[in-house]
Amino acid sequence: MISNAAAWAALFLFAAGMTYAGVKDVVTMTITNRLVLLLAGAYAVFAPVAGVGLDGMLTSAAAAAVVLTGTFLLFAFGWIGGGDAKLAAVAVLWLGADQAFTYLLYVSVAGALLTLALIQFRRLPLPAFLQRTEWTGRLHEASFGVPYGVALSAAALLLLPESPFFSAMI
């Protein structure tokens, strides 16, 4: 059953890519275009083989385009990074148009919790063993910003069971 195997492979690839994006954003505050393009290309390859219909693919692409437009506005105002904007759109592509609003809601909640946790973390003195690592010191600085890729990734992973790829396996 090729569609079932393709759906499993796609789910693994998407989950691994989103997890990598979240971790990389914490460490480097970057989400590479290469990763976003890999995820978008993998969707184009896996979706038809996994049984996601053309209508589902087109509505997911339209929802992703709307999210990309909105997140680029947020980027233009300096509220999020460019990688965050692109990662949000590719996540909606994978999760499907039906989950776009729920995804953005989950991202908002996860982002708020992450921001509050960082504010608390930055109020405390940085332990000596964390001072030896460059990225923890940078993350501890108030001017550093919030690695929002963590919220984007967490929300996508929480909604993964609602994706069209899970539906293809049932």
Image: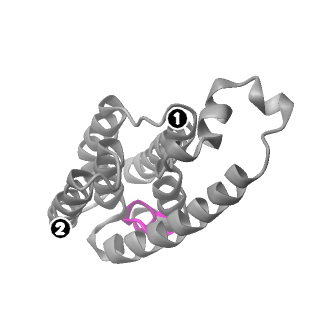
Residue receiving disc 1:
24
Indicate left or right for 80 with 154 as reference.
left
In the image, residue 134 sits, relative to residue 146, either above or below, namely above
Residue receiving disc 2:
59
- Expressed as whole percent of the image width and height from the top left, the position of residue 152 reads 45, 56
- From the viewer's side, name the closer residue of 61 and 105: 105
In space, the residues marked 2 and 1 are separated at their CA atoms by 29 Å
| Disc 2 element | helix
In the image, residue 25 sits, relative to residue 159, either above or below, namely above
Q: Amino acid at mark 1?
A: Lys
Which of the 4 quarters of the picture holds residue 97?
bottom left
Residue appearing at x 76%, y 23% in the figure: 132
- From the viewer's side, name the closer residue of 90 and 3: 90
- From the viewer's side, name the closer residue of 72 and 32: 72
Residue segment shown in magenta: 160-167
- Expressed as whole percent of the image width and height from the top left, the position of residue 35 reads 37, 34
